[in-house]
Image (cartoon, helix red, strand yellow):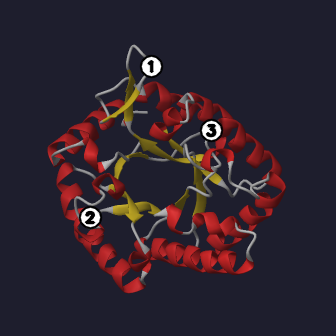
């Protein structure tokens, strides 16, 4: 399994255009590019990032926009909100195409503790069909990520969405830290949507004797990455694994490099 790093791991420690020169010396050759704001979707800026990536010999697998800036409005019942959000969605997809990405990572809409309205399956399933059609125009695969504060926060949602949609163009991302933050076992997401997983976000975690969750750098917690990877492969997974941690979880790039080296030792032969 190919192991890469998401530029989200260096959020606000460096600007995205400067991250390639930080990752390449670690031996990283595959990245997910996290675009932080609307100005970073502009073609001229994205072409700058692409040049920096090419100079460092880095390949982009996926693009991941700052979802809470517009993705909720993709599912809005207000026509102007939805139209504007789809325009931004197209900008992000075009950015992905310029970067050479083949996958787009989507959070979707927040559920806000169950208070979000108008997110019934019968209403959002047709929206997903629209989203898939637009992504296909750009040659990019749409992947929905499990996120603790968004509608896909439980395995049952992914299973039911896949059943009702009946369109295997929609793929999924397994995010370990978001699974445990949702109070779910990451293996349960593999069981629910494993045949359609095409991306994987890695972070470690630990539970105290009292059951308190804390997130850790990969290799510093309790996650059995190898067992999880093997379970995914048994479901047909052939995609990469990206370290995606919060930037305040490490103080130096050496710590990120250490986790990258550890994950490669666990997954490279799967």
Query: Residues under labels 2 and 3: Cα distance?
Result: 31 Å
Query: Residues under labels 2 and 1: Cα distance?
Result: 43 Å
Query: Residues under labels 1 and 3: Cα distance?
Result: 27 Å
Of all residues, the one furthest to the top in this rendering is 209
If you read the primary sequence from the N terminus, does the residue marked by circle 1 or circle 3 appear first? 3
Q: Residues within 10 Å of mark 3 (few under 14, many from 20)?
A: many
Q: Mark 3 and mark 2 in contact (Cβ < 8 Å)?
A: no
Number of numbered labels in the structure image: 3
Residue 102 visible at all: no
SS at mark 1 in the image: loop
Nearest the eye: 85 or 58: 85
Residue 208, x across and y down, in percent: 37, 19
Name the residue tied to disc 3. 194
Q: Is residue 24 left or right of residue 97?
A: left
Foreground tag (1 vs 3): 1
Foreground tag (2 vs 1): 1
What's the residue at 43%, 33% (across, down)? 270
Name the residue tied to disc 1. 211
If you read the primary sequence from the N terminus, does the residue marked by circle 2 or circle 1 appear first? 2
What's the residue at 30%, 32% (across, down)? 265
Name the residue tied to disc 2. 57
| 198 shown above or below 215 | below
What's the residue at 28%, 28% (across, down)? 220
| 36 shown above or below 206 | below
Residue 196, x across and y down, in percent: 64, 46
């Amino acid at each position: 399994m190919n192991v890469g790093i998401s530029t989200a791991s260096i959020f606000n420690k460096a600007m995205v255009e400067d991250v390639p020169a930080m990752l390449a010396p670690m031996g990283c050759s595959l990245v997910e590019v996290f675009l932080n704001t609307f100005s970073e979707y502009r073609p001229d800026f994205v072409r700058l990032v692409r040049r920096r990536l090419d100079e460092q010999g880095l390949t982009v697998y996926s693009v991941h926009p700052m979802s809470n800036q517009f993705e909720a409005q993709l599912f809005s019942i207000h026509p102007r909100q939805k139209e504007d959000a789809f325009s931004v969605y197209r900008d992000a997809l075009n950015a992905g195409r310029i970067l050479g990405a083949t996958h787009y990572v989507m959070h979707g809409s927040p559920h806000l503790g169950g208070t979000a309205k108008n997110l019934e399956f019968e209403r959002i399933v047709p929206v997903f069909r629209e989203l898939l059609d637009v992504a296909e125009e750009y040659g990019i695969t749409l992947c929905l990520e499990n996120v603790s504060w968004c509608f896909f926060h439980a395995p049952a949602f992914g299973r039911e969405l896949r059943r009702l949609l009946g369109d295997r163009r929609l793929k999924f991302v397994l995010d370990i830290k978001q699974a445990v933050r949702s109070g779910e076992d990451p293996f349960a997401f593999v069981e629910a949507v494993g045949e359609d997983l095409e991306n994987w976000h890695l972070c470690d975690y630990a539970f105290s004797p009292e059951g308190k969750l804390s997130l850790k750098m990969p290799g510093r917690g309790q996650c059995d990455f190898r067992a999880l990877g093997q379970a995914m492969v048994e479901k047909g997974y052939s995609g990469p694994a990206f370290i995606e941690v919060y930037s305040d979880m490490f103080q130096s790039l050496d710590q990120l490099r250490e986790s990258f080296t550890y994950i490669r030792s666990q997954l490279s032969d799967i």
